[in-house]
Image (cartoon, grey):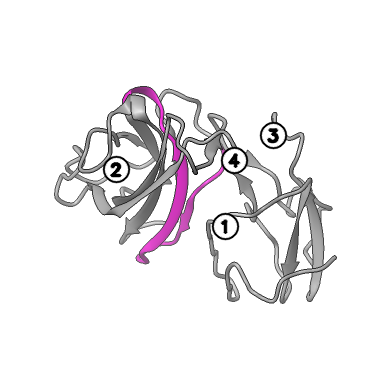
Amino acid sequence: MKYLSKSVYGFAHHLLIMSLVALLVVGSAGYYVWGQQHVQDALAQTGQTDGNAGEFNPVSPYRLLDTRDGTGGTNGAIPAYGEISLKVTDRGVIPSSNQVSAGFFNFTVVSPKAKGYLTAYPAGSARPEVSIINFVSNENRANTATLKLGSNGEITIYNGSSSTIHLISDIMGYYSSVNGPDGMRLNQSNSYTRVLDTRTGTGAPKARINAHSSIKVPLTSMNGY
């Protein structure tokens, strides 16, 4: 298997790292590890593209949510194992819900008091088992995510922690729900699909990835993809 000389993320001993990566995939994707580790959610398939437009529109980062000051309608920390709804459309430079199908977001968990994880997904759909951020106590963590919008142009955010958390979210672009001349449509299901977890044998043998070795992860024919 050929692999690129560029990394998609770096990691350290006993440190969970997450990253959003866009890949051109033909049937399967390769995963090469420099060092030895267990991999959780190394690939969490969120969407595909085709040539039928629905173009991506980048915008200057616009703050949608800051639970510390009430921006976005949530004034106060998200409860332990609780969730909030976040309105995305008709805010700032983001058009109305009938013109937007998905958004490109940055999320930051601020000073959590316990370890946990964050999940975000289209409002009105079932909560997926895949996280977008894993965090530990007293350490800010951030990650980006492309998310389909749900009912009334909203997403739902779940705090999978035994403690309250403060959260910041900015939007940096959106996918149009109408055809555009040069763009690509985001085809996304209502939930994420876990395609690799070496701890359980999902998508690969149940074993650590050996140092300086690679594995192939099948991506097609998974939940309709």
Q: Is residue 158 left or right of residue 18?
A: left
Q: Rounded to the nearest whole Å, what is the CA distance between mark 4 and mark 2?
A: 33 Å
Q: Rounded to the nearest whole Å, what is the CA distance between mark 3 and mark 1?
A: 17 Å
Q: Is residue 10 left or right of residue 216?
A: left
- Given the image, on which type of amino acid does mark 2 rest? Ile
Q: Is residue 210 visible?
A: no
Quarter of the figure with residue 100: top left
In the image, which residues are magenta?
129-152
According to the picture, the residue beneath numbered tag 4 turns out to be 49
User: What is the quadrant of the C terminus in the image?
Assistant: top right
Residue 23 inside the magenta-drawn segment: no
From this view, report whether residue 208 is shown above or below residue 163: below
Q: Nearer the viewer, residue 69 or 175?
A: 175
Could you say whether the residue bearing mark 4 is in a helix, strand or loop?
strand
Number of residue marks: 4
Q: Earlier in the sequence, mark 3 or mark 4?
A: 4
Quarter of the figure with residue 72: top left
Could you say whether the residue bearing mark 3 is in a helix, strand or loop?
loop
Mark toward the viewer: 3 or 4: 4
Q: Rounded to the nearest whole Å, what is the CA distance between mark 2 and mark 1?
A: 27 Å
Residue 46 on image: x %, y %: 57, 42
User: What is the quadrant of the N terminus in the image?
Assistant: bottom right
Label of residue 98 in the image: none
Residue at (47%, 35%) from the top-left corner? 54
According to the picture, the residue beneath numbered tag 3 turns out to be 225
Label of residue 78 in the image: 2
Residues marked 3 and 1 touching at CB (< 8 Å): no
